[in-house]
Amino acid sequence: MIWRQARLAIEAGRYLGWRWVFFRGRYALQQRLGLLERKTPARPWEAIPPSSWLRDPSLATAEAFARDWREHAPPFFFHPQQRMAYRSRLAAWSGGPHDPVTLAENIARGHFLYFSHTLQKVGFPPDWHKNPWTGQRFPTERHWSRVSDFGHGDIKVVWELSRFGFVYPLVRAYWRTGDERYPELFWRLVEDWRAQNPPNLGPNWKCGQETTFRVMAWIFGLYGFADAASTTPERVLMLAQMLAVSGERIAANLDYALSQQNNHGVSEGVGLWTLGLLFPQFRQAAAWRKRGRGVLERLGQELIYEDGSFVQHSVNYHRLMLHDYLWAMRLGQLHGRPLSSALSRRVAQAGRWLYALLDASTGQVPLYGQNDGALILPLSNSDYLDFRPVVQAVYVLTSGRRVLAEGPWDEALLWLFGPEALQAPLQPETQGNLQARIGGYHTLRSAQGFLFTRCATFRHRPGQADMLHVDLWWQGQNIALDAGTYSYNAPPPWHNALARTRYHNTVTVDERDQMERVGPFLWLPWLRAQVRKEVSSPRGEIQYWEGDHDGYHRLQHPTTHRRAIVQLPGEGWLVIDDLGSQAAHVYRLHWLLADYPFHGPHPQQGLRLDTPKGPYWVLIQADQPVELALTRASSEGPEGWRAPYYQTRRPALALSAVAQHTSVRFLTLFAPAPLRMHREGEAWHLRWGAHEAHLLLASQSASPLVRSVQWTHPDGSDLWEIP
């Protein structure tokens, strides 16, 4: 065990840096010795008098503090006096499962929304430390540093309600209806959480990012319910104390968040920046404001790459990061303390990156990377999978214009920027091909859809082993899709299993992952990938992309996975996977497809999906004998499942082809028309509907993998030799 840990430490130091390894080792020692408990001591709320966190002792009474706050409240996204003026505008956005009045009424009955999707009956007030799926309960009497991340089930399920994300629909419902029950619900939940979560005890104090999300929601509620009858001076002072203690908790352990080099540091910077701006009465306000600003500026430049992609290799964590910066940058504008133009440019690029992945008809994106259900600013009736609210808001923030036509997603603009944002100029952008080479994200667009793939050499630690994964979209339907994330900590076989290579649309070798999983969120060694070719035919009818990775070079008999993608006329897509070695391997190609009624698969005709937009075909061929299999919703494990929402499983179709040989070339043809494909030497003949093409492939080691494409069209035929 000791030797294995030493080896892992050396390997981690190679990729993450020795400074990271040293910090984590020192942090673990501090935890074991109880130094974190001394740094953030557990104590009852009653032991934290206003004099310990207020600059001005004359504000230590409830009446004095509340009066000062009401008379001198720093600017927020909206003002309580706007409530009646907003009502008519908000009435235009109503209905659907995410209507805030419906959600507020559910909360009153003890039904809370988990991960922006699943309604759970947990009672009112809820048990803040219990997992309603499993019944597991986290200990409440231990200091947060003594609470295990993984010892009591999925801690994220317990954290979910303590983020107070339900505050946003409560405020939105109150501003629509004026129903005084909704602010009373807010205050009763705050009071109960306070009673059940003394400072620094239990799981809900364990993470500074979770504390920040709670701070953001509490502040949104404080401003949103400022003029409600239930917002008494005593409650205002009580919440101010809770905010001050939360700021102390964030500041005390910020270095740990920064060591993660991900959204945790960004979020905790937002927490300090927010408290420093909005509560100048706090003793630490100026220090927190300065520290928070510095963190936000530095991490924005370090963690958002120049091409707009983000270090966490996840579209949902990308949205979380953008929500963080939307909140922080807008507050800075309102307070006359704008964050830098350099940061604004980086955030704008991150917004353009996300827009490039958007299916504009649905608002959905490829569900790529870890997906833990986070939606920290639920400010519209849009579904969790709809990314239009954040895309629209980032464009307004960074350019003062809208890129999407108006819709329910625009409610977020009203809350963050006011009514004038709804009149921002509408200037749509063409969604061309994405070529984010630093982050390794690529799209090819056709008239009716697009294809997404990943080809990256990692700068920061990967979350999944999924290189060269492909998502395919046609007429707003995600035909070939990412499995998502079910749970970070569930009983086998669901323990973050969908992060593995075999459940992505790529190839596994000898049932091995592309990297070895050596921890809950750590893969080693980091593979390297490169784009070998990215070109279009002279008239643009055909696009060609090719990349490879070295994840299987670590095997005793190494092999390189090379993937070529050919976008053909008539919405045809051909994906070619080339693998070769000096010894035989088991090569397994996997495609996870949407759960539509199907026919097949037939070895020569393929699999037909009967989608709502019409039939769609998938056909796999190879230059070696293969064994085809189709699995839907396996009873034995994750095969044939997808998790579009955290803690939610849905059936999918897992189509696989397995070959055992020294080398193999798989060819997968997708099209909304019947398919035929056969081989003659190095040439492959393809037919999809009325379209036909002939491809000449290169020898095993040559590049590009496809030497030429000849296709027919109404004017005759063309031959394109790929340069």
Image (cartoon, grey):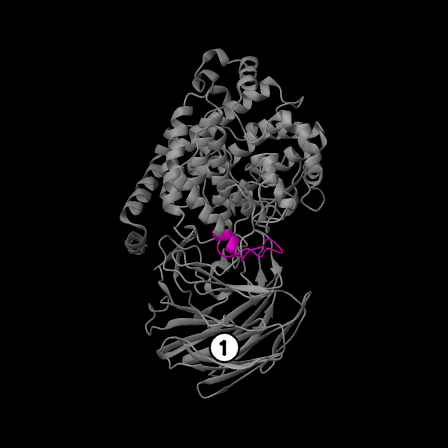
Label 1 secondary element: strand
Q: Is residue 239 above or below residue 636?
A: above
Question: What residue is drawn where x is 50% and y is 70%?
Answer: 540
Which amino acid type is marked by label 1?
Leu
Residue 144 lies in what quarter of the image?
Answer: top left
For label 1, the crowd category at 10 Å Cα-Cα, with few meaning under 14, some 14 to 19 and many 20 or more, is many
Whether residue 354 appears in magenta in the rendering, the answer is yes
Specify start and end residues of the magenta stretch as a single range. 353-369
| Residue 70 shows up from this direction | yes
- Viewed as shown, does residue 593 lie left or right of 510? right
| Residue 87: % across, % down | 69, 33
Whether residue 368 appears in magenta in the rendering, the answer is yes
Quadrant location, the N terminus: bottom left
Question: What residue is drawn where x is 61% and y is 81%?
Answer: 605
Which residue of the protein is positioned furthest toward the front in this rendering?
715
| Residue 64: % across, % down | 54, 13
- Viewed as shown, does residue 461 lie left or right of 385? left
| Residue 130: % across, % down | 57, 41
| Residue 170: % across, % down | 65, 34
Q: Is residue 698 above or below residue 332?
A: below
Q: Is residue 156 above or below residue 542?
A: above
Which residue of the protein is positioned furthest toward the top in this rendering?
58
> What is the chief secondary structure element of the magenta stretch?
loop
Q: Nearer the viewer, residue 529 or 23?
A: 529
Question: What residue is drawn where x is 44% and y is 72%?
Answer: 564
| Residue 473 shows up from this direction | no
Which residue is under mark 1?
A: 667
Q: Nearer the viewer, residue 513 or 722?
A: 722
Residue 682 lies in what quarter of the image?
Answer: bottom left
Q: Nearer the viewer, residue 60 or 635?
A: 60
